[in-house]
């Protein structure tokens, strides 16, 4: 009997253990299922955010491409305006010179006309005392010869004056024709300038709209910092390529900047908006300086060298880089338009660009940087005090 009770007890204990195990297993499975669902939810959220970030980056990239096209269009228009301005200045000088020459010719013509009047009057008075009257008067032959020679000189002088007057009149007519043509050309240039400036204003309004949209996309500091870091990497990459190309194409050695520290002319004169080494964003610091200056002002080369880069670069806009030799380079960014191209040799104080706000800048100015063997240095210490 006891054995039966013991067996029954064992059966009941085993049954209880099995039930407990089953309950634990069921609970474990339930917890694992919940954890898996939570993990799947996290993964889906990560994927969603990554897709969102990817789409946002694509949108930013598209906007940057639009900004590039708009700023290149502005550069082309600004270049046309710059060239038209130069032609207009040359025409103004030419017209002024023609007007002066015209005044001289008019005075010369008046003098010749007065001379001719005097000669004709003298010849008329001489005609009243003809050689025949002189001969009949019984004067000697010597006096007669003198009067005859005088008459010949008088006649020759009149003929010469007539020729000079005709030549002056012809030249004066030519000057008047040239002046008329140049004034017509001047008017055509003024009309072209008005059209191009109107076009430029429209392009600048479109650009400002794109810049605002880009700023709206880069809302957080981390996004903006990431964009700046990526832009700097692009700059370093492009300059490495440009430097390699410059080394391969170099024919004559250049002396570099080392002997001219503290003596280089400023690329533009203006207030410094950002100093070298100051905080740009987060841990990122300015590798150059930004000098405030109105759009359209001329940017000058600080020293002689060869242009190794002249193109639009994201974050820096229209950038021009000059190789000065011995690992020294100067950088000019944010330009409205570039006046030099890759391969051009420039001298100190040559106009190389026009100040602008390209690259998405909110105000016009010049980004200026100097690098020695690839490393940025404080450019201010290399410029004249």
Image (cartoon, grey):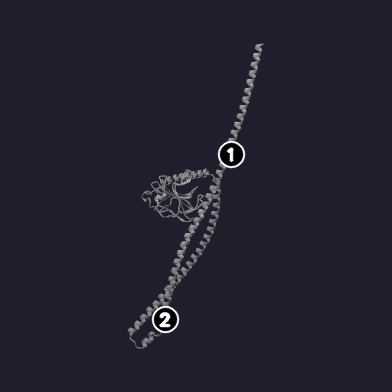
Q: Position of residue 179 (x, y in %)?
A: 48, 67
Looking at the image, residue 209 sits to the left or right of residue 87; the answer is right
Mark 2: few, some, or many residues within 10 Å (few <14, many ≥20)?
few
Q: CA distance from mark 1 to mark 2?
A: 107 Å
Q: Is residue 187 visible?
A: yes
Identify the residue under disc 1.
48
Identify the residue under disc 2.
121
**Numbered disc total:** 2
State the residue in front, 10 or 101: 10
Q: Position of residue 322 (x, y in %)?
A: 42, 50
In the depicted structure, whether residue 54 falls above or below residue 108: above
In the depicted structure, whether residue 32 falls above or below residue 14: below
Q: Position of residue 302 (x, y in %)?
A: 41, 52
Is the C-beta separation of discs 1 and 2 under 8 Å? Answer: no
Residue ID at (50%, 58%): 81
Q: Residue furthest bottom?
A: 137
Residue ID at (39%, 77%): 157
State the residue in front, 240 or 155: 240
User: Does dot 1 land on a helix, a strand or a loop?
Assistant: helix
């Amino acid at each position: 009997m006891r054995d039966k009770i013991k067996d029954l007890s064992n059966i009941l204990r085993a049954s209880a253990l099995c039930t407990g195990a089953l309950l634990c297993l069921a609970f474990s499975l339930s917890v694992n299922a919940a954890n898996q669902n939570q993990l799947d939810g996290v993964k889906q959220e990560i994927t969603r955010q990554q897709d969102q970030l990817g789409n946002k980056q694509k949108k930013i990239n598209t906007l940057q491409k639009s900004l590039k096209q708009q700023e290149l269009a502005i550069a082309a228009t600004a270049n046309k305006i710059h060239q038209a301005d130069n032609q207009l200045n040359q025409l103004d000088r030419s017209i002024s010179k023609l007007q002066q020459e015209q005044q001289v010719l008019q005075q010369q013509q008046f003098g010749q006309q007065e001379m001719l009047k005097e000669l004709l009057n003298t010849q008329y008075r001489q005609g009243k005392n003809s050689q025949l009257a002189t001969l009949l008067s019984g004067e000697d032959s010597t006096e007669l010869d003198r009067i005859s020679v005088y008459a010949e000189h008088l006649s020759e002088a009149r003929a010469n004056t007539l020729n000079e007057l005709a030549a002056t009149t012809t030249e004066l007519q030519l000057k008047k024709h040239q002046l008329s043509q140049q004034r017509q050309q001047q008017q055509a240039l003024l009309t072209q300038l008005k059209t191009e400036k109107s076009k430029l204003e429209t392009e600048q309004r479109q650009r400002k709209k794109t810049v605002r949209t880009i700023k709206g996309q880069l809302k957080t500091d981390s996004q903006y910092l990431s964009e700046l870091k990526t832009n700097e990497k692009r700059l370093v990459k492009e300059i490495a390529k440009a430097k390699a190309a410059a080394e391969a194409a170099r024919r004559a050695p250049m002396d570099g900047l080392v002997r001219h520290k503290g003596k280089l002319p400023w690329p533009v004169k203006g207030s410094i908006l950002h100093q070298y080494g100051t905080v740009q964003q987060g841990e990122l610091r300015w590798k150059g300086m930004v000098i405030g200056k109105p759009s359209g002002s001329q940017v000058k080369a600080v020293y002689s060298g060869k242009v190794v880069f002249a193109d639009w670069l994201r974050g820096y806009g229209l950038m021009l880089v000059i190789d000065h030799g011995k690992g020294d380079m100067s950088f000019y960014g944010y330009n409205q338009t570039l006046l030099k191209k890759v391969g051009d040799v420039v001298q100190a104080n040559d106009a190389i660009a026009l100040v602008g706000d390209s690259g998405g800048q909110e105000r016009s100015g010049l980004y200026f940087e100097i690098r020695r063997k690839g490393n940025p240095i404080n450019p201010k210490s290399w410029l004249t005090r």
